[in-house]
Amino acid sequence: MKRLLAIICVLLVIFIGMYIYKNNQNQNNVTISEVKEIEEYINKIYMWQEITEEALPQFDNINNAPELWIWEVVKKNLEEYELSYEEIQEKAIEIFGENFKKQFPKEGSEYIYYDENIGKYITTGIGLDTLDDVFYIKEIKKNRNKYEVEIIEYLEDYENAMGIEENEIYDIYIKNLEEETIATIKSNENETKIIDTVKENINKFTSKKIELTKNTEGKIFIEKVK
C-alpha cells in the first residue's frame, strides 16, 4: 500500500511538473495577433535616418534615447498640427509608457516650434529623400510579458521613380544602412521578393534587437534597443 502511494506521489509530481512546463510554454508562444501588434508598434516608432540620423537608435533605457528621435517619433504620431505642451507630453507617454520621464523642452524642438501669437506648438513639414527606411522582423522571443524582437534594417531607394509615368516599371535599389546597393528589384515585383532578397543577403544588413514589454492593460512599449 505504501509503495502504491509512493508511486502515485511520484506520478503526481511528474504530472504537475509537466503541467507547469506546458503552461509556461503556452505563455511564451507568440500568437499571430501579437506579431501584428508588435509590427504595428515598431512601425509607429520607426523613423527616417535623414531626419533623426538613425531610424531606430540604440539605447539602454527609453529615457536615454536621443532627444531628436524621441520628439520626432511623437511628432510622427500627432494628429493635430497645433498643440499645447500638455498634449505633446501626453502623446509621448501614450507611445513610450509610464516609465517615460523626459519632458518636452519648453522652447520646442528642431521641428516643433512655439508660436507666441497663439500660445501653442506648431509642427513643421519635413523634406524626405527617395530612400525608404524599412525593417522586417526576423525573430520574436517571448518571456511572459516581455518580448525580444530581432529586426533587419535596410533601405529601399526609389530614385528611379521620380518623373516617370504611373504604370511605368522602374528599378528599386535595395541598400544597407551605409547606402551600399545590395540588390535591384523591379517595381512590379511584390514586397515578398524584396524581403526574400534581404534574407538571401542578410549578413550585409544591420540587425538590431528590441526589448518590449506589455503592461497590465495589454499595451506594448519599448524598453531598449541593442
Image (spheres, rainbow, N blue to C red):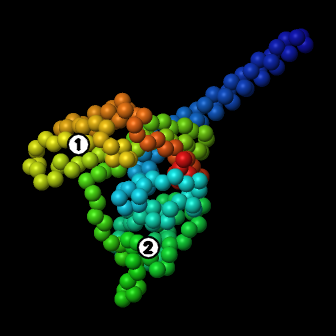
Amino acid at the residue labelled 1: Ile
Above/below status of 21 relative to 161 = above
Q: Position of residue 12 (x, y in %)?
A: 77, 21
Residue appearing at x 40%, y 40% in the figure: 205
Disc 2: CA contacts within 10 A as few (<14), some (14-19) or many (>=20): some
Q: Residue furthest bottom?
A: 117
Residue 56 vs residue 137, the one in the foreground: 56
Above/below status of 157 relative to 189 = below
Q: Is residue 217 left or right of residue 198?
A: right
Q: Position of residue 110 (x, y in %)?
A: 40, 72
Instruction: Give the residue number, with chain letter if any, for mark 1.
Output: 172
Q: Is residue 150 left or right of residue 179?
A: right
Residue appearing at x 63%, y 32% in the figure: 23
* Label number found at residue 109: 2
Element type where label 2 sits in the image? loop
Q: Position of residue 196 (x, y in %)?
A: 33, 32
Q: Position of residue 19 (x, y in %)?
A: 67, 27
Amino acid at the residue labelled 2: Ser
Element type where label 1 sits in the image? strand
Residue appearing at x 36%, y 30% in the figure: 200
Residue appearing at x 59%, y 53% in the figure: 60
Q: Is residue 5 left or right of residue 110?
A: right
Distance in Å between CA atoms under marks 2 and 1: 34 Å
Q: Is residue 19 visible?
A: yes
Q: Residue furthest left?
A: 165
Residue 1: image quadrant is top right
Residue 183 vs residue 104, the one in the foreground: 183
Q: Is residue 77 visible?
A: no
Labels in figure, total: 2
* Label number found at residue 92: none
